[in-house]
Image (tube, rainbow, N blue to C red):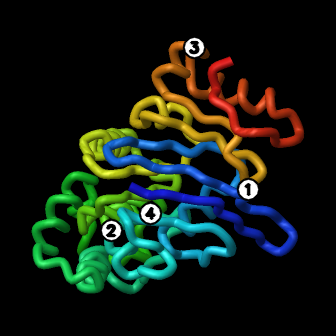
Amino acid sequence: MITVTNLVKHYGKIVALNNISVTFQNAIVTAIMGENGAGKSTLLKICAGILPIEKGEVVIDGFSITSDSIRARERIGYLPEMPMMYDRLTGKEFLFYIASLRKLADAEKQIEHLSHLLDIDRFLDYEVGTYSKGMKQKLSIITAIMHEPANLLLDEPVWGLDLLTSRALRDFIMERKGTTILATHSPRFVEEVANVVYILMQGRIVAFGDVNMLMTRYGSIEEAYFHARDRMGPYVGDVQRVTD
């Protein structure tokens, strides 16, 4: 479980997060939607300990991301929107390097299983620099989940993935027991995997709701999103359930 309380973040004069408070529950897949610059990636980066907290608090399974960072981050798997990799390493070398940092005892078994699941096993002996965007995304997903984290943060997880791999990732997410948070522009992916969706605008959570309920009422998550967006107009008001 991840608890975010009164989180504030600025980039210069730009308000990236404006007093965000939300609890991401265990065994729940939570989607975060919003336009570019809404604050989705910033929220995930702070929860993952990548960006420092300006104001507020983030607690991961009882451990503060600031005062107990090591134990908090041990319980997190994080997939960034723009993964950084070592192009001169082979895919296998890169995965074993990450596994060594995480001190995984069963690294070989996990790498074999996950690379097969994401259909990249036959490319692991090639240098990462020769990989396509989709192949790099697959490799990055493996680094995020190989240590079986209790809390998984995914920023645009299906970006660059083929349909078969997207389905495999969807099935993996739906079978997880821990906390899963995904930031995405894909209403269809939200419909397929998420239980709850939050909508961000101008650094604030302006609406939220149960995915199945929203699909029943509006026909799709895309329509529910635009309904919430239209109700907000050019300025952000108080948070609301997307039910009206």
* Residue lying at 51% horizontally and 43% vertically, measured from the top left: 31
* Residue lying at 36% horizontally and 61% vertically, measured from the top left: 141
Give the mark toward the camera: 4 or 2.
2
Q: How far apart are the alpha carbons under marks 4 and 2?
A: 14 Å
Secondary structure at numbered mark 1: loop
Q: Label 4, on which residue?
A: 79
The disc labelled 1 sits on which kind of residue?
A: Gly
Give the mark toward the camera: 4 or 3.
3
Q: Label 1, on which residue?
A: 37
Where residue 126 sits in the image (x, y, percent)? 30, 74
Quadrant in the rendering for residue 27? top left
Where residue 224 sits in the image (x, y, percent)? 64, 25
Q: Label 3, on which residue?
A: 217
Secondary structure at numbered mark 4: strand
180 w.r.t. 129: above or below: above
Secondary structure at numbered mark 3: helix
**Residue 6 located left or right of residue 165:** right
Picture disc at residue 27:
none
- Along the line of sight, which residue is nearer the eye, 82 or 55? 55
Given contact means CB atoms under 8 Å apart, are the residues at marks 1 and 3 in contact?
Answer: no
Q: Label 2, on which residue?
A: 75
- Along the line of sight, which residue is nearer the eye, 108 or 48? 48
Where residue 138 sits in the image (x, y, percent)? 36, 59
